[in-house]
Image (cartoon, rainbow, N blue to C red):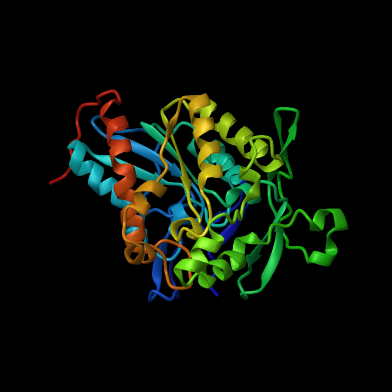
Amino acid sequence: MRQLYEYHPVVGYRFIPNLKARIQHEGGGYLVHANDDGFRSNRRFVKALAPGARRVLFFGDSFTAGDAVSNHHRYTDVLETRLCEATKAKVEAYNFGLSSTGTDQQYLAWREFAQGIEHDVLVIAVFVENIRRVMAHYRPHRDADGRERIYAKPYFSLDGDTLLLRNVPPRPTPYEMLDLPPAEQGAVDMGGRFALLRKIVNAVGAKDAVQRLTHYQPLPDYDSPNSPGWRLMRAILSEWIRRSTRPVVLMPLPLPQHLDQACDASAYQARFAELAAELNCTLHDPLPAFMGYPAAERRRFRWETDIHYTPEGHRALAESLAPELYRLLVQAPQRKGIVCPG
């Protein structure tokens, strides 16, 4: 198995800088190209924004980094092209997505790598399963030999309402589960492999099964605004959004079960809506747009066994987000000098 990541003392890891690799996949394989900062991009991330240009920074996990598709098929890259055409200006999408990370690590990546990068809009894409990841102190990852090992991650804890950063730098070498104290074994998030998600999604094969599962809640920490998971997630997002000097789009990404109508999305939708209203940022919930597609077409938004987006799924997400970004970009201060090529 090709090694794709290297240790980072703050975020935990990043893509190997300047990596170029072809990854085997059920879709026929895909290309990963990382820049010198260790993020999937075919170009360098530069701080200065050229006159007349627009720039959007994207943060998220594997659904933003683009697991299972080549760079140019990702929703960020699709948006770059469409927004360039719509605004008649040069638009740059800087994709800081890091696979298998939590929102806590994505916030640290913003602090570590994006400070000083000129931009017009910040998009924080939260795959809703991340509410488990921010509670975790350890997560499983596969090493270069394909063996699943347990690695420490940076994480935040709450002292009242104050965020405290823990475990930086994280230990670079892996653990065996039995090496961990019993209390810490419960802080290992085993959800990153999505085995439970696949099992549930694959079990939904008929209308009556969907109806029976409609009220299933795979992420109960969204049920209450006072749950430990949501309090921590809320604190991380609140600090991040308040520190941003540019407009922020908060975008929760649904589970496959939500697309299949196998569980109820209303709890997480309520929590993100409350947070966006409190912080006066833009909330973009793509689930209603996804649900506007016929079920058979919606099923093609992810792979047969891999739950990540297909190129069709990335295009649908880009279509839903484009109007919000267009609105924010045309409101941004004008910079003269560069227009959209062609």
Q: Is there any visible trace of residue 173 in the rendered image?
A: yes
Q: Residue at x 59, y 58 (%)?
A: 6
Query: For this view, does 140 lie left or right of residue 327?
Result: right
Q: Who is closer to the viewer here, 305 or 182?
A: 305
Count of numbered circles on the image? 0
Residue placed furthest toward the left: 342
The residue shown at (46%, 47%) is 96
Q: With 48 as the anchor, is 37 left or right in this view? A: right
* Residue at (53% x, 64% y) in the render: 4
Pinpoint residue 30: horizontal percent, then vertical percent.
Answer: 39, 69
Classify the position of the N terminus by image quarter: bottom right
Identify whether 92 is placed above or below 188: above
**Rendering coords of residue 197 (x, y %):** 57, 64
Depth check, front residue: 207 or 330: 207
Name the residue rendered at 64%, 60% in the picture.
191
The answer to whether residue 181 is seen in the rendering is: no
Residue 49 image point, x, y percent:
33, 33
Q: In the rendered view, does 312 fall on the left or right side of 179?
A: left
Asked if residue 269 lies left or right of residue 53, the reply is right
Q: Quick check: 206 above or below 268? A: below
Q: Position of residue 337 (x, y in %)?
A: 19, 30
Q: Quadrant of residue 310?
A: bottom left
Q: Nearer the viewer, residue 292 or 103?
A: 292
Q: Is residue 111 above or below residue 43?
A: above
